Amino acid sequence: MSYSIDLGLYIDGSWRTGEGRDTHSVINPATGEALAELPLATAADLDEALAATATGFANWRAVDVNARAAILHKVANHIRERAETIAVLLTTEQGKPLAEARTEVLSCAAQFDYFAEEAKRSYGRVLVRPTGQRALVLKQPVGPVAAFSPWNFPVNLMCKKMAAALAAGCPIIAKPPEETPGSTSAIMQCVIDGGVPGNVAQLVYGVPDMVSRHLIASPIIRKVSFTGSVPVGKHLLKLAADGVKRTTMELGGHAPVLIFDDCDLEKAISLSATTKFRNAGQVCISPTRFYVQEGVYDRFVAGFAAHTKQIQVGNGLDVGTDMGPLANARRPSAIAALVEDATSKGANLLTGGSRGNHGFFFTPTVLSDVPMSAKVMDDEPFGPVALMRPFKTFDEAIEQANRLPFGLAAYAFTENARQANLVADALDTGMVGLNSFVISMPDAPFGGVKESGFGSEGGPEGLDSYYVTKAVHQY
Ligand code: NAD
């Protein structure tokens, strides 16, 4: 059985199931069939979680950082031990191939290990003062956190927030997506079994707008962390502004890739075509707008399309599947509309462009010579669609890359070191990959600029976002 888990809310140390609560049907995106019913939090549930988190904060902030680290390492070990079971849940409810699900689950363990150790190095400062006087800058946990994470990397993105908050001494109420509660609940059980107190890490599901309004309005919550779309991020920022709450916002992207004439073309083609369709393109840093210099445009486009045609689409649990279905019923319709708009305006459809006849499948799609008027050049497709356009000069490529309000990730392929430095400086994004698409790891800041958000997750910067500073002056 690939979906064997009791779904519930974890509030103040106990799992709450059914008991007359409204429910949400969890769907297998490969088949469209219902897997289970998920109970949704009521206002009373959220109030209970808020009261518990206030008590949890008082206790957890006082726990020695080494003791917190030991608990977080135990969580990481439980995740590693249960990785296969959690990966199967994740694939069944989200669709991604099992190999990708395994990597995602293991990345959660890596985050708990990283933040456990990094928190030990959260030093303050001593300021220079006359003899007998002291001035200190202390880092203290910001307080209870409300964390909202999306369905594309359900466990990775929940753990990014949870591991950093817990390491810094903050309790957290996590609201992962309702689409994929099996894997996030199984991770939560690892957190519980690792020894995190029940009022320190809590898990709720619900109607997203109701839950976020309720939690963010509470004076108990001191920090809001959200990963998801730009419109929802703006909405939550406004709610957080009422209480002047700290926020970390990881919002959308529409990542450009600059392919220069002097790149290693074979490497650029194979890495691009593989990475584009990872998680069926439902990745905020997914390479999407391919700007290719004229000298290699035809060869790049032909090579990319040929690689794409080899991709095996199927149920993520089946051996040999390279790309699974999209995660929910909204995505195939959204992508079909964008592809139809682009082709109607003159884009060449080189491969893909069709939906499956069951589940939420959409074939890997390559569009070349996409006109600038096509909506997909401006709107993040968040799906298996690659867009190709030629460029002549460096300046033109940079202008195109920086054209949109997004500023999350950008990539460039060039073998010229000076050009690589210039392009990295000129790209208006929070992250840049040079001759690589690997830009997300626990020790590096992950985050965007412009409308892609602000603040970082990952690295010391990610940990810092869960501290406030206090200056102590002693005369
Ligand atoms: P959406 O905008 O409705 O939701 C995005 C995420 O925010 C979901 O996880 C959802 O549960 C959550 N959400 C929605 N309203 C909320 C609220 N009021 N309070 C708290 N959370 C709320 O869109 P969708 O159809 O789920 O996803 C489509 C778009 O979302 C994509 O096109 C993409 O731009 C974006 N997205 C981005 C990421 C990312 O990693 N940055 C992840 C998932 C989705």
Image (cartoon, helix red, strand yellow):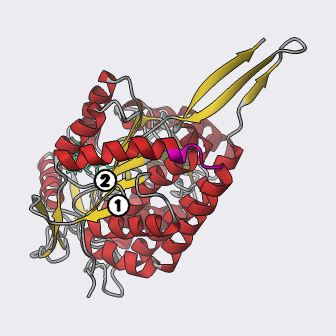
Callout 2: CB less than 8 Å from ligand 1: yes
Give the vertical position of 469 relative to 73 (above or below): above
Q: Is residue 60 magenta?
A: yes
**Residue 226 spot, x, y in % from top left:** 35, 43
Frontmost residue, 246 versus 276: 246
- Regarding residue 305, the answer to whether it shows in the image is no
Which quarter of the picture shows residue 386?
bottom left
Q: Residue at x 44, y 65 (%)?
A: 192
Number of marks in the image?
2
Asked if the residues shown at circle 1 and circle 2 are in contact, with their CB atoms under 8 angstroms apart, the answer is yes
* Image quarter of the N terminus: bottom left
Which residue is at 29% across, 65% downward?
15
Q: Which residue is mark 2?
A: 150
* Amino acid identity at mark 1: Pro
- Which secondary structure is most common in the magenta stretch? loop
The answer to whether one can see residue 315 in this image is yes
Q: Residue furthest right?
A: 131
Pointer 1: what residue? 154
Q: Residue at x 48, y 33 (%)?
A: 428
* Mark 1 neighbour density, 10 Å: few (under 14) some (14–19) many (20 or more): many
Q: Tell me the element at label 1.
A: helix
